Image (spheres, rainbow, N blue to C red):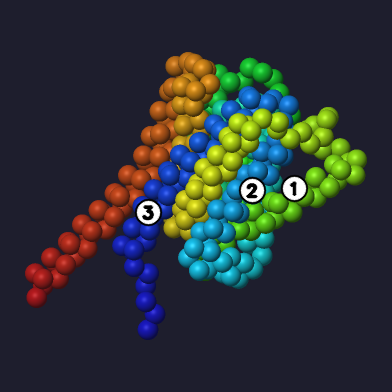
Amino acid sequence: MSRKPDKNVYEKEARKGLFFMVMASVFFSFMGAMVNYAQILEPEGSPLVSSFVRLIVNILVIAGVAWHSGELWKLPGDRRPSLWARGFFGALSLIFVMYGIHAIGVGETSFLHASNSIIIAALSPFVLRQANSRLAWVAIAGATIGLWFLAQPRFEDHNPAGRIVALLSGVWAAIAYLMIARAGRSNSSNTVIFYLCGVGMMLHMLIFMGNGAGVPVPGSATGIVWPRRPVTYGFLVGAGVMASVAQFFLTAAYQSAPAALNAAVSYLTPVLNLGWSVFVFGRHPDGLALAGAAMVLVCGVALPVIGVSARKKTKQAHAAKAQDSESLSL
């Protein structure tokens, strides 16, 4: 006799997943702010160095956690292709994000990177067999409009190459996030992050060796430039720690809640980056940007969480009504 999935368990997991995505957005915003500050300290530094340091810190953190729990040998997981694909496209996205931050700043980069939500919503019915609800589409549409308002004041430094790179980071991220969900719960968060770090470090080493052999580095006329000041490395290491925590939450989110709803909630990151721009980097947004931030918070964060809770209450009411009807019939 086949058992139907417990809908109450599903709703509980979905709410937990959305909470994880909120936390991931918070820590990713810390990461972006630290990378941006490191870039301000040493503008000539290579974006590849930023991403490489982050990956090193990432893999040290997950190895330490796995060793402490006695599960270091479980890091390779079941080695399914989706894990390797997640590592490859996740590493590409990371490299492109770092180039974007160096070229056009953390604010506009985060807006363009957030376009991955639309791609995830469009592909999840085909890749994950997850039908998108009307709520998910409304949340993504509203948050996208809000992000356009939010980013509009920043379209002033005219760097088309930087924008293309940041937009492509969103494409690679969408594929990587879909692969997280596809890898399923048979692989731990540590395993998923392990493939990101492993494949990413291999990509970086290939680029570094190519640069040493005289192959030009994309986006850099001077090749690989390493930071000279210890404080810059401090910010890059701090960014790696923040990214490590964010990756744990991100992976758990996509393993728990529907991909499209997670994608909508992830729009919180650009709003938080707006806060960093105001309170740390001295940028002052206009009313249109603030209106966009409000739309993102309402459509991208509050609406999915309220919707999941409302569905739970509706199902509980229907169940209670059915039970009362059954009692009366007896």
Q: Which residue is mark 1?
A: 204
The residue that appears at 50% across and 30% down in the rendered structure is: 273
Q: Nearer the viewer, mark 1 or mark 3?
A: 1
**Left or right of residue 239, residue 296 in this image:** left
Q: CA distance from mark 2 to mark 3?
A: 27 Å
Q: Is residue 241 above or below residue 256?
A: above
**Left or right of residue 151, residue 226 in this image:** right
Q: Which residue is mark 3?
A: 16
Per the image, label 2 sits on a secondary structure element best described as helix
Residue at the extreme front of the image, as rendered:
230
Q: Which residue is mark 2?
A: 55
Figure quadrant of residue 43: top right
Say which quadrant the N terminus sits in.
bottom left
| Near-viewer residue (182 or 71) | 71
Q: Amino acid at mark 3?
A: Lys
Say which quadrant the C terminus sits in.
bottom left
Alpha-carbon neighbours of circle 1 within 10 Å: few (<14), some, or many (≥20)? some
